Image (spheres, helix red, strand yellow):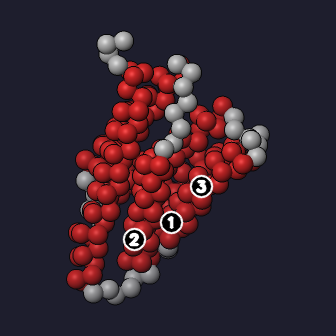
Amino acid sequence: MNLPNKLTLLRMFLIPFFLLFMYIDVPCNYLIALIIFAAASITDALDGKIARKYNLVTNFGKFLDPLADKVLVISALTVFVELDSVKMGAIPLIIITAREFMVSGLRLVAADSGVVVAAGIWGKLKTAFTMVTIVGILCWLSVCNDFGFSLPSGLVDAVDNIVIPVLIWISTVLTVISGLIYLKAYWHLIDSDK
């Protein structure tokens, strides 16, 4: 097994530990979850670059890499929906998940037609922004819960009720835009008239 595939497997392996530390009440659990998520995100950035640079692209990597990305992001967002301290409703999660299913289905149809659906700039921007948003939320949770800093209530209210929801909705809008761009580019493969 080559290095990019090992990095992808590591990302999948880290997801249950990320979830574990989001749910258990131990000292610095959010900080540990942040470190795990950041490490997993770094493997996401590295595996594809290494695979392309050294011509180590495999079918296993093509299958597992996008799956690992989706499971990592959707796991974090699902946990945020459950947390009272994060103002995230289910609607952005549903939109983001639906887009991921749509693009995965599109990739399957394209592959059956011999077409490779490569990640475009909007898909990369969506992924990067969403991961940075998740890291930012995890940093905020860590600051507020792990270290017990006494922050001004106005700042806490602004971040909890304005900044975090805005970041989540920007991620959602980028997700929709990138999904529509994929759909437009490959609509000819799923056109019901054909």
Residue assigned mark 2: 141
Which of pointers 1 and 3 lies earlier in the amino acid sequence? 1
Q: Amino acid at mark 1?
A: Leu
Q: Nearer the viewer, residue 142 or 109?
A: 109
- Residue at image position (23%, 76%) is 157
Which of pointers 2 and 3 lies earlier in the amino acid sequence? 3
- Residue at image position (59%, 52%) is 44
CB atoms of marks 1 and 2 within 8 Å: yes
Q: Element under label 2?
A: helix
Q: Amino acid at mark 3?
A: Ala
Q: Nearer the viewer, residue 78 or 178?
A: 178
Q: Measure how far apart labels 2 and 3 are at the Cα level.
A: 24 Å
Q: Which mark is residue 45?
A: 3
Q: Position of residue 64 (x, y in %)?
A: 59, 38
As drawn, 44 above or below 162: above
Q: Measure how far apart labels 1 and 3 are at the Cα level.
A: 17 Å
* Residue depth check, mark 2 versus mark 3: number of the one nearer the observer: 3
- Residue at image position (53%, 38%) is 118
Mark 1, Cα crowd under 10 Å, few <14 / some 14-19 / many 20+, is many
Q: Which mark is residue 34?
A: 1
Q: Quadrant of residue 60?
A: top right
* Horizontal side, residue 90 vs residue 68: left or right: left
Q: Position of residue 42 (x, y in %)?
A: 60, 59
Inspect this view and state whether residue 142 appears. yes
Which of pointers 1 and 2 lies earlier in the amino acid sequence? 1
Q: Position of residue 85 (x, y in %)?
A: 30, 66
